[in-house]
Amino acid sequence: MGIYDREYYRDETPGWYSVDGRRATVGLIAATVAVFVAQLATVGPGYPLGRVADALALFPDAVLGGEVWRLLTAHFVTAGGPTGPSFLAVVFGMITLFFFGRSVEEIYGSRELV
């Protein structure tokens, strides 16, 4: 029996490319990308970040007025400049979430990650 055949030596963790058991991380990435695409589709005059961003972003006066969903949905809205939402912010944010979110989800579970 070689050393690699021993059960305690085997590494059962999936590779960096695997999404098995990381459904919450992939779901958060999909939701953020979907909101980003919706933001891009609704950019127009008077709405530099899109109507979707205006409806989901965190405005304290709106939350105090009863729009409490903004406390959760603001995390999916992508900031940007006068030309619209920032593509690089989404790309680097989702890469960061993919690598760190998988580790956190593996340790604490999907519920705690979300």
Image (cartoon, rainbow, N blue to C red):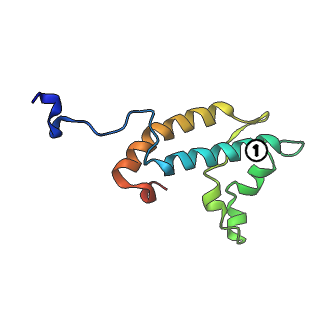
Describe residue 24's horizontal placement relative to residue 47 as left or right: left
Residue 108 location, x and y as percent? 36, 54
Task: Residue at the far left: name it.
Answer: 1
Task: Residue at the far right: name it.
Answer: 45
Task: Residue at the far top: name it.
Answer: 2
Q: Nearer the viewer, residue 84 or 30?
A: 30
Tell me if mark 1 has few (under 14), some (14-19) or many (20+) residues whose alpha carbon lies within 10 angstroms of its own: many
Give the number of marks. 1
Residue 80 location, x and y as percent? 70, 37
Residue 86 location, x and y as percent? 69, 34
Q: Residue at x 81, y 42 (%)?
A: 41
Q: Residue at x 49, y 50 (%)?
A: 23
Q: Residue at x 12, y 29 (%)?
A: 3
Q: Quadrant of the N terminus?
A: top left
Residue 47 location, x and y as percent? 83, 45
Q: Nearer the viewer, residue 98 or 1?
A: 1
Describe residue 4's horizontal placement relative to residue 74 as left or right: left
In this rendering, is residue 33 above or below 87?
below
Which quarter of the figure has residue 83?
A: top right
Mark 1 sits on what residue? 39
Mark 1, secondary structure of its residue? helix
